[in-house]
Every structure is written in structure tokens, then in C-alpha cells.
Image (cartoon, rainbow, N blue to C red):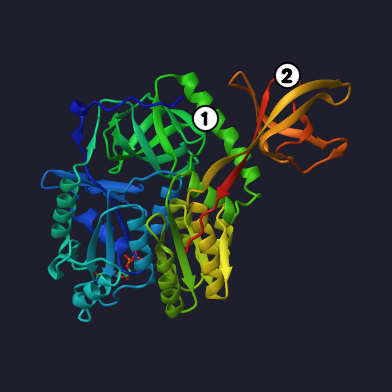
Amino acid sequence: IMAEPEDDLDQMITRPPVVTIMGHVDHGKTSLLDAIREANVTAGEAGGITQHIGAYQIEHNGKKITFVDTPGHAAFTAMRARGAQITDIAILVVAADDGVMPQTVEAINHAKAANVPIIVAINKMDKPAANPDKVKQELTQHELVVEDWGGDVIAVPVSAKARIGLENLLEMILLVAEVHELKANPDRPARGTVVEAELDKGRGPVATVLVQNGTLHIGDTIVVGHVMGRVRAMIDDKGRRVKKALPCTPVEILGLSDVPEAGDILVAVEDEKLARDVAEKRQQRKKEEALKSNNKISLDDLFKHIQEGQIKELPIIVKADVQGSIEALGQALEKLSNDEVKVNMIHSGVGAINETDVMLASASNAIVIGFNVRPDNNARKIAETENIDINLYRVIYEVIDDVKKAMSGLLDPEFKEVIIGHVEVRKTFKASKIGTIAGGYITEGKITRDAGIRVIRDGIVVHEGKLDSLKRFKDDAKEVAQGYECGITLERYNDVQEGDIIEAYIVETIKRELK
Ligand code: GDP
């Protein structure tokens, strides 16, 4: 019902990149966002800088860049878990004095899992203890090899505090954006994602939305997640009232019937009734899901899910007590991979299973494995709501065993039908309670009680099903062999006739185990 118009390639225009800043706590994400913003305030907007919405846009050398101001990969991945991918480029902030820290690694893995290009900003270069080479060295351990070390990752030394290197960082963002040829079509109904939302006392529900495609206009009817509305007013990141928002423009919108959630998708629709119906349906589904969320999805379900999705890769997240365990596990799991199925450890780390591990698992359909560690309280809660199973182990061998099982589940089982015999129907009898009994003669092979059967009449299959009973004289039989007579009744089929051939077959499942 919410089918969207195809984009006409002629109408596509280059759109600004949407950038998210990630990194370890205190490495300077907020400072960098603020520094970039302040450095790019033009004279006329100076007053607007106090305006704070969840995203802002700047202009550098005549080109726009949109920054989403939700620092932290948790928020980033929470959005992705809900199906919203808003980021084109991730800036990984690493403090030059501190180097790569646990949340730096998390951020790297989250960006990689989302397939988002990473630009490294080595921050706090003003500090005497700054050691960018050490940072670069540490990054290589996470498969980020910077350009001056022969890799393809752009690293820019900056100082948010001393305002050093910011221009260079913006240049690099624009460069990466250009390579990725980001396009949008402004001539279509808007589509976007909620960055943040709240209930404002005076103004009612307010949502900051990043319009990603199309143009959003005042008066547009919109569906945002389970909420509908009509755009009554729009305010841009500089506090100005605007009449329309082009692709990659963040705006605050008023006029919603309720408060949506961050990560909800906004769609502008022509038909108000349709909008209302869709919103209601979603509201209903949301309620049902809330009820259902008590029934946790098991590991098996997850594997099935992966299998159905034809993903021949088992993404896993490993948290362990010591680095040595992770390495041992990594090596053992690596050995399990074969041409068809791969174990992909998308994230690993020492310490408790935390909220972001679970979010990453949810967004990437990954399995969470804890080795001699436990989930913290937040992780436990999120795992409940996101229906993520956390698998805890104390011995490596058990992990390997379970993963092996999971991977065997990922291998396509081979089904093979084997015809085991043919029965010629020579007489039929009607019995009042039982239905039609076929008196038959086994012309070939055998028939077994639990075989699948087909009734063939003049070469045509007229029925396919199961046996209800198989008798030899008056006794139930498990199997009747060639050259003997038998009595047969069929499950839910009473039209069997003299002269029919009953073909018996079994299906062999060849479950392929990993070697
Ligand atoms: P966040 O947790 O990543 O958002 O980090 P903040 O932006 O809050 O910065 C953490 C601390 O590092 C603050 O005390 C900042 O003043 C300081 N800081 C941020 N950037 C720089 C920098 O370039 N140089 C120096 N010396 N300190 C910085």
C-alpha cells in the first residue's frame, strides 16, 4: 500500500552527504560537532546557533554537508535496527593521546556492519601527549589501514579545541561523498527518518526529521511510523521557519497526531485516508508485537530466519573474559567456515555484553556469544525487547558445537525422493466407518505404513497423500513386500478405484554436516 514511485534518473540531483560522528567517550565527538558548526556559522545566522535540533547542515566551498547530532554508535545502530539507514559517512573520532579504546572498536564494527565508509579524525592534536602514529598503528589491528601506510582509509589530524584541521576534514568528507555519487530526487513526495522526537508542552508533538529523498512541504500529509499528521510548520536547524525541506535537510516538523520514535520512517502521501489507515494498522501491529515480545525468539528461530533469508553467513558477536579466549574462539570458528557458509565475527571485545552489542546483533541478525561473561542489565532489557537470544558459555568446545549446529542449519539440506514400490488396486470395498478399502497386490518393491503415496490412474496422479492403514489379512502391518496382497485405506481419500496404481515413496533428507 505504501509503494513508492520509481525515481526518474533524469530528476536525480547530487545531494549532500549525511555524516555521523562516532568514537570512544570523551574523545571529542561533541566538541568536534560543535566546532564544525560554530566555524561555519555565517554572519546572518549567528543568532540561530542557539537553536539545537538533532541534526545540522553546513556549507563548505559552496557544498553542503549534513551532520546528524546523535553521537554514539548505539543510537546509530538503534536506528539501523529499525530499518533506517541515514548515515553516508562515519567520522571515527580517536583522541591522539588515548588511542583506540573499546568503544572505538565498537564504533568501527558498527560502521563496518552498516557498510558505511569511515573517515578517521585523530583529535586532540593540540595535546603534548598526542601520538597519531600510535593511533594509526592501533587502527591497523582493526583492518583500518590509513593512506600514508598504504591503505585506503583517510585519516585527518584535528583539534576540536584549537580548531585545527577542521577544513581539511570537511574537504575529505566532500571527497568521499563525491566518490559515492550520492543522489536524490527532489521532485517526488518526501521520505525521511526521524532523528529525535518529543512532546513539547506548547507546540505538541515535535519531530526532527532528516528528509532523505523528495521534498517535504507545508501541508503535506505524512505517515511517520505509527503516527500520522499534516505538516503544519517546519523549522530548520537555524531556527528559521521554512516552507519546504529538500533532500538531506534536517527540519523540525509540527502537526503530528502523536510522538513518533527516533528511527521511524516518514513518508508523504497524497491520500489522507490511506495515511490514516496505514498509521492505524501500524499502531495495531505495534500493540500485537508488544504482547508477543514475551515469547522470545530462540537460537533455532534465528538460524531459520537467516536460512530463509538465504544468508550463507553466520554473523556473530563475541564477548569474553580475556582477549586470549576471543582469539582462541576466533581461530576455532574460522576453521568451521567453508565454501558455502562463513562465520563472520562482526564484533568482539573483552567485558560484559552491553546494550550496543545487542543492538548490533539486532541490526545485523547476529548471534551474541558470551564466554565467561554476562550481559549487563541494560543489555538484558534490550535483548528482551529486541528478541535477541544471548548465548552464554563456559567452555570453548560448547561454543564450537553450537555454532556448528547453526551452520549445519545454514547448509541447504538435500531432499531426495525414493520410490519404494507399486501396488495394483484389484478390488475396493466400502466400509461404513472406515471409508474405502483398497485390496491390492504389490507388483514391485514394497509398501510401508509411513510411506508417502500417490494414486495413479491411467498414468495421471489423481491423489497424493498418506496411508491411513496398512493390513496384511486382518493384522496391521508395518510393511508388505512384493508378491503379497494387502488392504489399504488412505487418509482423506475415498475415491480409490479398481485398476489404480498406488505408488509408495519416501523422502530422504540428507542433512549435511560440517566436516
Ligand atoms: P565526547 O564524549 O566524545 O562527546 O567528548 P567531548 O566532546 O565531550 O570531549 C571530552 C573532553 O575532551 C572535553 O573536556 C573536551 O573539552 C576535551 N576535548 C575535546 N576535543 C579536544 C581537543 O581537540 N583538544 C583537547 N585538548 N581537548 C579536547
**Residue depicted at 48% across the width and 61% down the height:** 514
Q: Quadrant of ligand 1?
A: bottom left
Other residues around mark 2 within 10 Å, as few (<14) / some (14–19) / many (≥20): some
Which quadrant of the view contains residue 485? top right
Residue 213: percent from the left, percent from the top? Answer: 30, 34
Left or right: 370 with respect to 45? Answer: right
Other residues around mark 1 within 10 Å, as few (<14) / some (14–19) / many (≥20): many
Residue 497's label in the rendered image is: 2
Residue 279's label in the rendered image is: 1
Question: Which of 335/127 is in front?
Answer: 335
**Residue depicted at 35% across the width and 67% down the height:** 105
The amino acid marked with disc number 2 is Gln
Q: Is residue 488 above or below residue 393?
A: above
Left or right: 491 with respect to 380? Answer: right
Task: Provide the secondary structure element on which disc 2 rests.
Answer: loop
Residue at mark 2 to residue at mark 1: CA–CA distance:
56 Å
Residue 53: percent from the left, percent from the top? Answer: 35, 47
Question: Which of 315/278 is in front?
Answer: 315
- Of marks 2 and 1, which one's residue comes earlier in the chain? 1
Which quadrant of the view contains residue 21? bottom left
Question: Which of 375/151 is in front?
Answer: 151
